[in-house]
Image (cartoon, coloured by chain):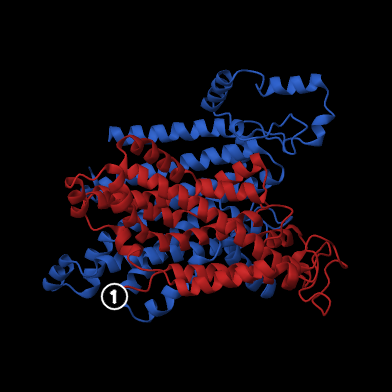
Chain colours: A red, B blue
Amino acid sequence: MFADAARVRGRAASVAAHSDQPSLARRQGHTDRPRLGILALVVTTVALLALVAPGLAPYDPRLSVAAPLQAPGPAHWLGTNDIGQDVLSQWLYAARATLTLALTVTTLATALAWGAGLLAGLSARAEAPIVAAIDLLLALPALPVYMLVLTLIGPSQLHVALMLGLLGWPAFARVVRAQVIATRAAPYVEAARCLGASPIRIARTHISPATLAVFPAHLVLTLRFAVFAEATLAFLGLGDPSLSSWGAMLGWAFANPLLFTSSAWTWLVLPPALGIAALLLVGGLSATARPED
Amino acid sequence: MTRLLLRYASLALAVVALNFILPRLLPGDPLDASTPDGLGSAVSTLTTDTRARLRATYHLDQPLAAQLVSYASDLARGDLGWSISRDAPVGQLIAARLPWTLALVLSSLLLAAALGGTLGLISAWQRGWVDRWLTPASTLLAALPEFLVAMTLLLVLAVGLHWFPLQGGRSAFAGDGILDVIWHLTLPALTLVLATTAGFMLLARGAVLGVRNEPYLVAARAKGLSETAVALRHAAPNAALPILTLFAVRLGHVLGGALVVERVFAVPGLGLLAFEAVRARDYPVLQAIFLLASLGVLCAMFALELLYRRLNPRHVR
């Protein structure tokens, strides 16, 4: 579910690395630059929300501060949930949880993917084990793996971030490796080799800069993946129980079988759903290419 | 061919080994009261004697190699373990849930692939109103998590319009009429179709756009073929590989269940079983689902590679 697109893309990239046909990856997405402007705006907004959440939030999101299931009113702008917590405060703190998680996962996954991709493309000895690991990790179905691992180690925010980061690198590592393989045969690299440059110097000054071109699109996709995965896991009850996140708020709301028998869903379901939708839609739009003609 | 088979066999072995090692590798001991996970506070009430007996039951007192042997022999006999929370064999639980998931996921996958492929072809070929409206709509749909799509449908069609039931697989006391089941499965299937069609459509559109200016299409037109014939006979088959890839990936995931959708609509399939297992920390069930889902993906990918060779001999290397 999370990795479908990445998988198809990764497969295309691996085919491209071995054949001389025009690559699918290049045709479908990697020539297109993401619209970083919109994304920057949204990330800045969420970052601001995350930073000022403690100042803005009228109540402590973890405490029951009023009667349960109160409708929105002057004291509680978005009402209260079934144990009397203030929904607005939870909503604001959720932005903070989402952003920290997304940034941690992206940093970790990118660093791993870049290192592994470079190594697999440059070192003949490291190539086979890394490619095998990539194949294995890409073959695992994402959600069942996440559920099994989180059930075994217990869902805390740190565990979720570590798990997504440590399992989320293979698709991009493949792209980096394909890029390295394409670059290392380029005439200027050959020229450098003829001039007597050491393998390390070639890797550092000639090959690794060439991999930077695929970074912007990847960063957007990984941020989106992290938000998407966290929301889904939290909705399924695999988020940090002590932190409010938008997915968790939805999960808590759906845990009540009588949710739809009153109008409480309007303030329990809509605010977190809109938060997730806004973040993912803008992330998705900025990641998709302009239609190519 | 042999190399391919070897590669997939070793991947399958790796998955089985991972399934064995993962719980033993990760921190936490179910019978250690000092850790917050496992059986937790209940453990401290157990006598040393009971604890030793539990360890013996699950072979936890034996060396790792012996554990691996007993695990592998159980697996070879089709024994997937014993559920902690339901006190029943895991295989039996899964067999009871499988028909629901298969009916729901397979029907919506087939529908979505056909629909998405057709729409993608039309929108890439005609570039008219279909492209103008459907492409942004699909981009939006593909960007949303399934549970949001599911909730929107639930709110509009079930809560608002009362056209469909809120949740469940069949009405209480209604017997087992097939129409009743279909009525209950419509919303979850619709969610899956919407969410999946978007991906198929964007992929088909991209693939067809990619071949639109190829010389062989010019040649086909030069022969005097109509635009429709060019699109259907020459462009579509050459753009079919990505669609096939996505279809195989999705097909492989069928055994994982449609977790999110089954949770929202409380469809009693594999996904809901996994969700309930998470709630109860019933990891034998989760392990079995993980194993089945991974092997399913591997089988699907293997079939795909074989098909690739038939459809596009250039891929053989």
- The residue nearer to you, when weighing B68 against A33, is A33
Please provide percent x and percent y for residue B182: 58, 59
Secondary structure of the residue carrying tag 1 is loop
Point 64% across, 35% down: residue: B27
Quadrant for residue B35, please give it.
top right
Extreme residue toward the left, this view: B223
- The residue depicted at 70 percent of the width and 58 percent of the height is B171
Q: Residues within 10 Å of mark 1 (few under 14, many from 20)?
A: few
A143, above or below B4, in the image: below
Judged left or right of residue B301, residue B78 is right
Q: What residue type is labelled 1?
A: Asp
Query: How many labels, in total?
Result: 1
Between residue B124 and residue B52, name the one nearer to us: B52
Residue A77: x and y, percent? Answer: 78, 76
Residue B42 sits above or below residue B272 on the image: above
**Is B14 situated left or right of B316 in this image?**
right
**Residue B54 image point, x, y percent:** 73, 23
Give how far across and how far down residue A116 sits, in percent. 40, 44
Q: Examine the rendering and report whether any part of residue B165 can be seen.
A: no
Camera sees residue B317: yes
Question: Which residue of the protein is positioned furthest toward the front in this rendering?
Answer: A196
| Quarter residue B229 falls in | bottom left
Seen at 19% across and 74% down, the residue is: B226
Residue bearing the label numbered 1: A293
Residue appearing at x 67%, y 45% in the figure: B278
**Frontmost residue, A220 versus B91:** A220
Kindly identify which chain the residue marked by label 1 belongs to.
Answer: A
User: Splitting the image into 4 quarters, where does residue B206 fall?
Assistant: bottom left
The C terminus of chain A - image quarter:
bottom left
